[in-house]
Image: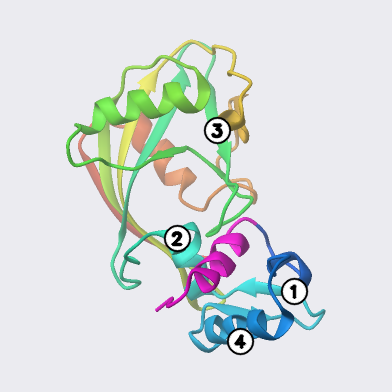
Amino acid sequence: MLDHHIQKSIVYDLAFAESLRFSELKPDDMENKAFTYHLKKVMKAGLVEKQEDGHYSLTMKGRRVGKGALKKESRLLDRAYSILLLAVRNIDTDEWLLYKRQTQPLLGLTGFMQAQPVAEVDTRSTAKQTCFEQTGIEAEFAVQGHGYFRVYRKGELESFIHFTLLLADSPSESLRGTAESAGYFWQRTPNFERPDMLPNMRTLHKMCLDLPGSFVEQTFEL
């Protein structure tokens, strides 16, 4: 799908922004003609489109590739992306640890922390390690439920995930001030139906309050 490292870089860079100008995408040491060739290739592949104002942005297909563009083997677009969703709460104050997404898909929306499952490590250990590395917070996680979420925007599939939800009760510790903690914040009694929340947050919050072991499969339209 992406035959050249420049093509991969174009998709990767756009995963962190709503749109970028030609000059913001092009490497400084590359001629315009050569870069235009690769830009046209990713546009022909249906991953990038040019806006009316001249900026470039990812298509829905491109958003599903997102920052995974730099991986050696792109995941198949019609398969669910496997993810761990980590909910951390202070049960006494009803404070929840939330994260504002820094990349596509669903850039800028708020939800729970995410982690990548690792073949050699059990999910609870992965959740604990990721939480500490990203925020400096020590937490013990338990599996709460799992399922599938699909998100469509204007009739096109933007996100398709298979998720496992893990829950940890933790005091509202201060977040560690590092680059990894950017985007994380504590919020007391959040409204999980706010328009700036990920569309699945109402469902995930309900799963956190229910008994462990639930399964859901839902589709959302933005």
Q: Amino acid at mark 3?
A: Leu
Start-end of magenta stretch = 1-16
Instruction: Tell me which numbered mark, 3 or 1, is placed earlier along the sequence.
Output: 1
Local packing at callout 4 (Cα closer than 10 Å; few below 14, some 14-19, many 20+) is: few
The CA distance from mark 2 to mark 1 is 20 Å
Q: Amino acid at mark 4?
A: Tyr
Looking at the picture, how far across and down is residue 38, in whole percent?
57, 81
**Residue 114 seen:** yes
Relative placement, left or right, of 122 versus 112 is left
Which residue is under mark 2? Answer: 70
The CA distance from mark 3 to mark 1 is 33 Å
Q: Which mark is residue 98?
A: 3
The CA distance from mark 4 to mark 2 is 19 Å
Looking at the picture, how far across and down is residue 203, in whole percent?
41, 45
Instruction: Tell me which numbered mark, 4 or 1, is placed earlier along the sequence.
Output: 1
The CA distance from mark 3 to mark 2 is 27 Å
Instruction: Tell me which numbered mark, 2 or 1, is placed earlier along the sequence.
Output: 1
